[in-house]
Amino acid sequence: ESDTGRPISHVRARFTPDLLQQDAGRVLRTLATIERQVRASESDTLYVMRTLPYRTTDNVIGGVVVTFTDISRITAAELALADASPGRAFRNGERLRLSVTARCDQDMNSPVIGFSWKDARGQEIFGSNTLAALSDDETLLAGDGFVAEFAFALPALSSGRYFITLA
């Protein structure tokens, strides 16, 4: 069933906070994309909700597009890393392996996955991505899953708390 032409006020939100109508109005006024985290009302699923202008093939604004990306696993992994036992310390030079599993919410040509290792102030220390490993004709369809794996030696770091950000 298509929602094309359907007023946004007819959509029943199943997430909190319910700011869909306000976001849609703001996007139509400013033509700027709005991105926020929302939680499903009937589960603990966490999403990034993006509201952006819908442009017709004639480049006319014809409404808004709303997309939802499930970030529950990524958020859980980030929390697990942030709450890791203080007794677990990584040693400088230690070989680490990071595996990222993702699923496309739309068709994508040559998707790039990356990570950044950051200090407690959010400053990037190092990172990597899959750009060099891509073939130009690699296309993933909506719903396809894929895994990106990174192996690296931990550089010399001072003691403290560090975070990994995925993108």
Image (cartoon, rainbow, N blue to C red):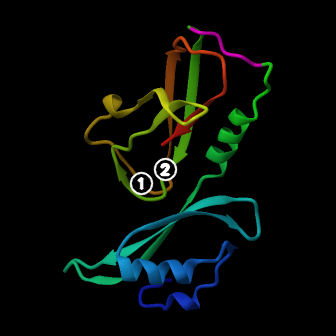
Residue at the (41%, 54%) spot, across then down: 141
> Which contiguous range is marked in magenta?
88-92
Q: Which mark is residue 12?
A: none
Taking depth in this image into account, of 135 and 61 the one nearest to the observer is 61
Image quarter of residue 45 = bottom right
Q: Which mark is residue 144?
A: 2
Query: Which type of secondary structure does the marked residue at label 2 adopt?
Result: loop
**Majority SS type along the magenta span:** loop
Residue 79's spot in the image, x, y percent? 70, 41
Magenta region includes residue 147 = no
**Which residue was labeled with disc 1?**
141
Residue at the (57%, 33%) spot, across then down: 164
Would residue 39 appear left or right of 155 to someone viewing this image?
Answer: right
Residue 57's spot in the image, x, y percent? 22, 77
Q: Amino acid at mark 2?
A: Asp
Q: Is residue 58 above or below residue 17?
A: below
Magenta region includes residue 89 = yes
Q: Residue furthest top?
A: 93
Would residue 112 appear left or right of 160 to someone viewing this image?
Answer: left
Question: Crowding near pointer 1: few (<14 within 10 Å), some, many (20+)?
Answer: few
Taking depth in this image into account, of 165 and 54 the one nearest to the observer is 165
Residue 23's spot in the image, x, y percent? 51, 77
Task: Check whether the beta carbons of the residues at disc 2 and disc 1 lie within 8 A of each other.
Answer: yes
Compute the Cα span from label 2 to label 1: 5 Å
Q: Is residue 75 visible?
A: yes
Image quarter of residue 161 = top right
Q: Is residue 2 visible?
A: no
Q: Residue furthest front?
A: 121
Query: Which type of secondary structure does the marked residue at label 1 adopt?
Result: loop
Taking depth in this image into account, of 35 and 100 the one nearest to the observer is 35
Q: Amino acid at mark 1?
A: Leu
Q: Residue furthest left?
A: 58
